[in-house]
Image (cartoon, rainbow, N blue to C red):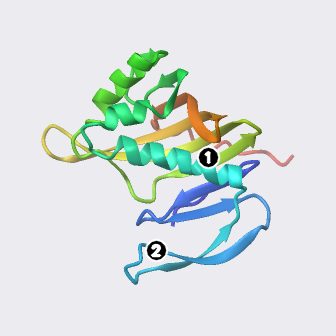
């Protein structure tokens, strides 16, 4: 099972089959049974996220489902999740996108990558809510076939900033970048 990231607020991750588990700082936990209804459910200990944290997580998951839907309209549907004044720094983009047309153009490329999927178990997010604004930061891995038909994984890290408008979370800023070779962990001296 994926390990949840911790933050002030809540965190969420998914397991190897894409089932949702949630964890947050503190001891607000309960046991639940999750699964797809095919008899292969799992018993998990879940921590309760606040209503706002849950709805921000749902907004991020909606983005993931939309961008990887494979639908002809995926670019337009994904771009519609962004505010008119949103800024996007896409995972595979060299350009900062500051207009609705620029954002839509990015997703005409990215959302239409044939076979684009999210690697099950790769989504992990830390969620912070501050009234009418919220931040969701974490990891997701995209799986996409290359030109030779081989599968290639694009490891990404993200930050979505949301603004609540008429009860719905819309994206006002989104930065996503590929995770490159990691810097070795720094040892902290106890002396």
Outermost bottom residue:
39
Q: How many marks overall?
A: 2
Residue 35: image tag: 2
Percent coordinates x, y for residue 49 in the rendering: 70, 58
Is 146 located above or below residue 4 in the figure? above
The image shows residue 45, relative to residue 146, as above or below, that is below
Locate residue 188 relative to residue 83 in the image: left or right: right
SS label for mark 2: loop
How far across and how far down the image is residue 41, in percent? 46, 79
Q: Quadrant of residue 110?
A: top left
Image position of 8 with respect to 176: above or below: below
User: Residue 139 in the image: x percent, y percent?
Assistant: 51, 45
N-terminal label among 2 and 1: 2
For the point 37% across and 28% down, the residue is 92
State which quadrant residue 23 falls in: bottom right
Say which of 10 and 66 sits in front.
66
Identified at 41% across, 81% down, the residue is 40
Residue 101, relative to residue 156: is it above or below?
Answer: above
User: Which residue was labeled with disc 1?
Assistant: 56
């Amino acid at each position: 099972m994926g390990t949840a990231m911790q933050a002030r607020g809540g965190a969420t991750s998914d397991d190897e089959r894409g089932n949702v588990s949630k964890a947050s700082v503190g001891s607000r936990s309960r046991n639940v049974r999750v699964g797809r209804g095919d008899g292969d459910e799992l018993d998990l200990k879940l921590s309760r996220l606040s209503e706002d944290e849950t709805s921000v997580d749902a907004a991020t998951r909606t983005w993931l489902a939309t961008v990887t839907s494979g639908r002809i309209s995926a670019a337009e549907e994904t771009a519609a999740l962004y505010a008119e004044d949103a800024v996007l720094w896409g995972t595979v983009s060299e350009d900062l996108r500051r207009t609705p047309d620029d954002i839509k153009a990015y997703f005409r490329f990215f959302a239409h990558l044939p076979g684009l999927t999210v690697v099950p178990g790769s989504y992990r997010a830390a969620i912070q809510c501050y009234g009418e604004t919220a931040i969701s930061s974490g990891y997701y891995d995209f799986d996409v076939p290359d030109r030779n038909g081989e599968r290639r994984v694009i490891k990404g890290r993200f930050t979505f900033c949301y603004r609540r408008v008429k009860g719905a979370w819309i994206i006002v800023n989104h930065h996503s970048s590929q995770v490159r070779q990691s810097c070795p962990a720094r040892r902290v001296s106890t002396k």
